[in-house]
Amino acid sequence: MKFKRFLASFCLVLSLVFLTSCGGINLEQMPAIDATVYGNGGTSVVKGDYVYFVNSYTSYSNLEKNDNNNGEVKVGAIYRTKLKDGKVEYNNDVVQNYEMVVSKVVGYEYTNLYIFDDYIYYPTPNMEYSKDGTLNTKAIDFCRTKLDGSRTDILYTAKNYDDTCSYEFYKIGNSIYLVVFEVDKLVKVEISNHVKNAEILVENITGAIMPEISTYTYSNDVQVTGTQGYVYYTRDFSIEEDNAYDTSNITGNVLGRVSIVDGKRTERKSADVKYGLQVVSNDYIFVTKGVDIYAIHSSFPTTENEIGKQDIRISHSVGESLSISNFYTLKNSTGYVYTLNDKTYYCSNIINGKTYEIASKALTILGDSENYVYYTENSAIYRISLVPIYVNEKEFTLEASCTIGGVAKNAGDIISANTIISEAEYFALTNAIDKSRFAKNTTPELIVEDSTIDTKYMDFSQENVIYYFATYTGKDSESQVYMKRVVVSPDNKVLPEEDEEDEENTSDDSNNADKETNLGYNAELLCVLDDKHKPVETK
């Protein structure tokens, strides 16, 4: 997920599919239009020096009439904080440069934020009531607001949206597209010079998955590659569409893809294999066939045995099931992580990849960056290396020139304790060192330990930055959550206390190094809180 004046509360509704415009907030500055956007599709998204986010979370089911009136919402609204040198700026522990952008409830079950050019795109509860006074918590509005808060438009209202549904925003060519999987149909709305009528791409479907594209660089003609530009879906056979099949005896289904721009469909049909959708990477679509997982090439061949583009089975052996819930594909490679027999493995590539056991327990992966994957456990966030790293046990002198820790070394150089080297370096070492002096390190690295972490709402859509909601129960016993973030970079590590010289002199270097490594990273609060730790608007 991704989140000083009030918006005008009066809006003229033209239509469900036409723009609905309201008065705005009119902040003084906006990020440059060509600044790169990081984190599209999360609870927080960064453009230039600004991070836009929802300051809190509230459940749709807990809302009451008038709780989402435009201009009256402070908790769960969209705010922005201007970063200084990439960090949140404080004055006496109070967040500076903190401003409201959208005074609507956006921090709720279906929150994802997207920025394209000068607008932020998001959903908000529609607050539709039936004649009997019952709130329809399945009705949501998809909106956009200018980044200075000056204009808000309603793009589309989904009347039947729930936990089985999904949506994404894309820029393709010179248009923005909203795509919504709404129970059993795919709907698209194109936003170019104006908002076009909603179109149904596919009906009577049983599932859909969409590519996630978290980084956007300004362009008037955005090109797509690989699996981008398509939505992938499953559907059951129907007599009307599949009259060549005897649908009464079919146990399989139909796997298809549809072009977001022109609506062109491509399908593969199997009378006896039931496809299940898993995830989309840039190069492959991952599906289940029975108990096994297969990778389908991004060109989407209509048969599973097309020469050079055959479906690739990634399970260990025939009939052996992976733990589907723990299957995770890496963002910037064709590697993947999964659980098998309560152990977690990493495979470096779809084709002829090398497999490593990375944990002797089941891990649910939060995100990945470089050679690490991140996960949560016991109110803390950790990361663990995907490939083995080796740690030197003691200090010693090199007997020949070689590369250690990525740095060229000469014979006679002293290698200090806890020097970490990669697997490739370990196996490439010659007689320069005794490799037995290095031990495999399997200890996870602590990122942040926070008893207030709400592990249900975490976001790793930005490289090396983790956003999460922290919970607080105030004096009136009312529980509230607010947004924090952790930047995983060397200059943000928590440093050990400097007043323990005596202990340092009596402890060995190895223990001190381990202690420093596991202190974690500093967490930053993104919003302003009152004395009960509730998110508030700045005055």
Image (spheres, rainbow, N blue to C red):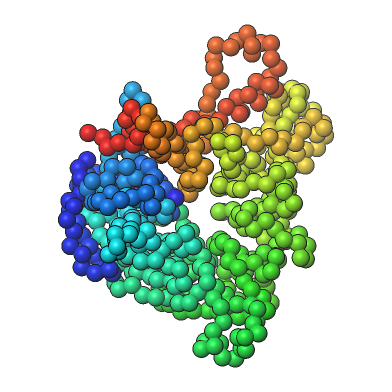
Query: Can residue 346 be seen in this snapshot?
Result: yes
Judged left or right of residue 209, residue 483 is left
Q: Residue at x 52, y 26 (%)?
A: 494
Q: Nearer the viewer, residue 216 or 475?
A: 475
Point 36% across, 41% down: residue = 55
Looking at the image, can residue 45 be seen?
A: no
239 lies left or right of 42: right
Q: Position of residue 460 (x, y in %)?
A: 50, 46
Q: Residue 306, how many percent across, how many down?
A: 66, 78
Residue 302 lies, in percent from the top left, at 60, 79
Above or below — where is 282 with respect to 452?
Answer: below
Left or right of residue 222, residue 8 in this image: left
Compared across the picture, whether 433 is left or right of 31 comes to right
Which residue is most to the bottom? Answer: 244
Give the residue at x 30% y 36%. 536
At horizontal 33% and vertical 23% (from top left) the residue drawn is: 92
